[in-house]
Image (cartoon, grey):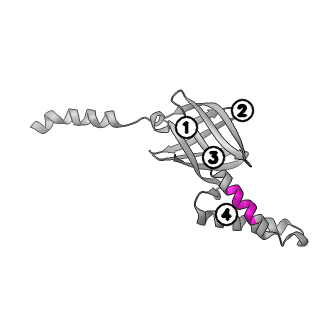
C-alpha cells in the first residue's frame, strides 16, 4: 500500500529528469561521420579513413593520365590532411535556437551562423543560414545524426558531443 503512495512521486521525479530534444541538442557537437548515398565519405575512425582514402585514390587514378599515376603517395598525404582538417568541424546549438557551424578550408576557419526550427514530434530540424537545410534527426545524450537531401544526394551526418 505504501508503494501506491510513493508511485506518483517516483513518476514525477522520472518525468522531471527527462530532457526535451531542444535541451539535449544544446551544446557543442563535433563531426564524426559523413555518408553520401550510403557510402562513407568521412570518418574520424582511422581504419575507416584508410578505406575511404584507398577507395578515392583508386577512383582518381583511373581518371589520371599514365604519367601522373605515380603520384599515389602525394595524393594519399593530401587526402589524409583533408581528413584531419575535416575532423575539426563543429556545430554548436544555443538555447536561443541559433547555431554556429565551424569548418575549415585549409587553415582558414569558416563560420556559419543561423537559426534552427525544431519539430520534436516529427524529429525534423531546419537550419537557416545562407542556405536552408532540412534534416530528420536522431538524438541521444552524446550522438546526433542528421539525414537529408543535398544537391541530389542523400546525406547523413553524424556528430558526437564535444
* Residue toward you, 6 or 100: 100
Neighbours of disc 2 within 10 Å: few (<14), some (14-19), many (20+): few
Disc 3 packing (10 Å; few <14; some 14–19; many ≥20): some
Q: Position of residue 21 (x, y in %)?
A: 46, 36
Of circles 2 and 3, which is in front?
Answer: 3
Is residue 123 among what the camera can see?
no
| Label 2 secondary element | loop
Q: Quadrant of residue 48?
A: bottom right
The numbered mark at residue 137 is none
How far is disc 2 from disc 3 in space, using C-alphas? 18 Å
The residue to which callout 2 is attached is 130
Asked if 103 appears above or below 98 in the picture, the reply is below
User: Label 4 belongs to which residue?
Assistant: 52
Q: Are marks 2 and 3 in contact (CB under 8 Å)?
A: no
Query: Which residue corresponds to the image point at 59% horizontal and 41% vertical from the top-left?
Result: 91
Report if residue 32 is visible in the image: yes
Task: Classify 10 Å Cα crowding around label 1: few (below 14), some (14-19), many (20 and above).
Answer: some
- Picture residue at 71% right of the left edge, 32% below the top: 130
How far apart marks 1 and 3 lie (CA) works out to 22 Å
Residue sitting nearer the eye, 43 or 102: 102
- Name the residue that disc number 1 marks: 124
With respect to residue 28, does 116 lie above or below? above
Separation of marks 1 and 2 at Cα, in angstroms: 19 Å
Magenta residues span 76-83
Residue 55's spot in the image, x, y percent?
Answer: 71, 66
Amino acid at each position: 500500500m505504501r508503494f501506491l503512495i510513493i508511485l506518483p512521486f517516483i513518476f514525477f521525479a522520472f518525468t522531471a529528469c527527462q530532457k526535451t530534444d531542444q535541451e539535449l541538442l544544446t551544446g557543442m557537437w563535433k563531426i564524426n561521420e559523413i555518408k553520401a548515398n550510403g557510402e562513407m565519405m568521412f570518418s574520424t575512425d582511422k581504419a575507416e579513413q584508410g578505406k575511404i582514402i584507398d577507395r578515392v585514390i583508386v577512383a582518381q587514378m583511373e581518371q589520371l593520365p599514365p604519367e601522373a599515376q605515380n603520384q599515389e603517395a602525394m595524393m594519399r598525404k593530401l587526402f589524409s590532411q583533408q581528413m584531419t582538417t575535416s575532423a575539426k568541424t563543429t556545430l554548436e546549438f544555443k538555447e536561443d535556437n541559433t547555431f554556429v557551424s565551424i569548418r575549415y578550408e585549409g587553415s582558414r576557419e569558416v563560420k556559419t551562423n543561423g537559426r534552427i526550427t525544431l519539430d520534436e514530434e516529427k524529429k525534423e530540424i531546419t537550419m537557416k543560414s545562407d542556405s536552408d537545410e532540412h534534416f530528420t534527426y536522431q538524438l541521444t545524450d552524446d550522438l546526433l545524426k542528421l539525414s537529408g537531401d543535398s544537391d541530389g544526394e542523400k546525406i547523413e551526418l553524424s556528430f558526437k558531443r564535444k
